[in-house]
Amino acid sequence: MDTLLRRIDSEIAADGGKRSKSRKHVIEIFFKAGTHVTVEELTRAARRRNRSVGAATVYRTLKLLARLGYATEHDFGEGVRRYESNLSPHHDHLVCRKCGGVSEFEEPEIETLQNEVARRHGFLPTAHRLDIYGYCRRCAPAAREEAAR
Amino acid sequence: MDTLLRRIDSEIAADGGKRSKSRKHVIEIFFKAGTHVTVEELTRAARRRNRSVGAATVYRTLKLLARLGYATEHDFGEGVRRYESNLSPHHDHLVCRKCGGVSEFEEPEIETLQNEVARRHGFLPTAHRLDIYGYCRRCAPAAREEAAR
DNA sequence: TTGGCTGCAAAACGTTTGCATGTCT
DNA sequence: AGACATGCAAACGTTTTGCAGCCAA
């Protein structure tokens, strides 16, 4: 974790950037925060540590992390962008329509099939997103009842 | 097509809605339009037929179609929402990062695997979205060159 | 006649940007 | 000193909403 922060620091330097206090706070908080955070959540958390951090800096820092490959932007269709750290291996999402919870899964076979499909279309894939929408274990019973009505 | 419009009409009526001229135009144009249209594109097209159609009506009509299950909202990360008719069978997308083109594919095996994964997580799936990002056949060579530089 | 529907303009939303100032190297 | 980063507020583009009038049932 500490090594990670140092590595990012030097990558930022190599990219022509500097180490600032606000940026450091945002980065630390981002990697400690749960997955799929919004800028608003991060800003609030960063402000708790340093009152003066502005939202613009959080936006800029996350864009930077995304550009360096440490974060991924997500859009689950809520009208807000969410960010996720790229430290854990790639995974896809199960998004609950009722409680909004997002859980994750990996399925190597799906990945393989995707690459195959892409190749078949002469398409050079660089990334993909697979989100399954529905009802999670806890919300599914209620959803079934509503549908029956 | 005509039957479709009549069916939608009666579903709107059953939903407590009325048939208005503007709405009818928007719906017709939406189903004739190519796939993945934006509200702005539809508004322009609708205005050609009826100068006074407002964007708000197009937004409202598409939300209505989506609620009734005739349209799907898409977000390919351009900052604009795109709508697609649900008439053609389900498919997934290959999104080109260079030219922005979107092509489609179907892969039943992927669908099957998705349902399996969901079930394994106690998740009740209702829909999903799979977008593969990368470079299309035409743009891939240029992308490879740039990467090599 | 009642309610939904409309167009318009204004508001709201998340995000980006311009700028003067502050901070790192 | 110089370059880059910051916070603020204004700008932005898309989508939503309030409202007075309109139109379908």
Image (cartoon, coloured by chain):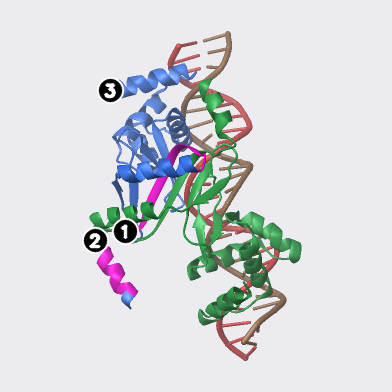
Chain colours: A green, B blue, C brown, D red
Q: Nearer the viewer, residue A63 or A1?
A: A1
At which x and y percent is residue A70?
A: 52, 67
The residue identified by callout 2 is B138
- Local packing at callout 3 (Cα closer than 10 Å; few below 14, some 14-19, many 20+) is few
- Local packing at callout 2 (Cα closer than 10 Å; few below 14, some 14-19, many 20+) is few
Magenta span of residues: B121-147
Q: Which mark is residue B2?
A: 3
> What is the spatial separation of the Cα atoms under label 2 and label 1, in whole angstroms?
9 Å
At which x and y percent is residue C7?
A: 47, 32
Question: Which residue type does callout 2 highlight?
Answer: Arg
Chain where mark 1 sits: B
Q: Residue at x 48, y 68 (%)?
A: A69
Q: Which mark is residue A43?
A: none
The residue identified by callout 1 is B99
Q: Nearer the viewer, residue A116 or A29?
A: A116
Question: Which residue type does callout 1 highlight?
Answer: Cys
Chain where mark 2 sits: B
Q: Is residue A51 visible?
A: no
Q: Nearer the viewer, residue B59 or C9?
A: B59
At which x and y percent is residue D7?
A: 70, 66
Mark 2 secondary-structure assignment: loop
Q: Is residue B40 magenta?
A: no
> What is the spatial separation of the Cα atoms under label 1 and label 3, in whole angstroms?
35 Å
* Up-down relation of residue B109 to residue A113 (above or below): above
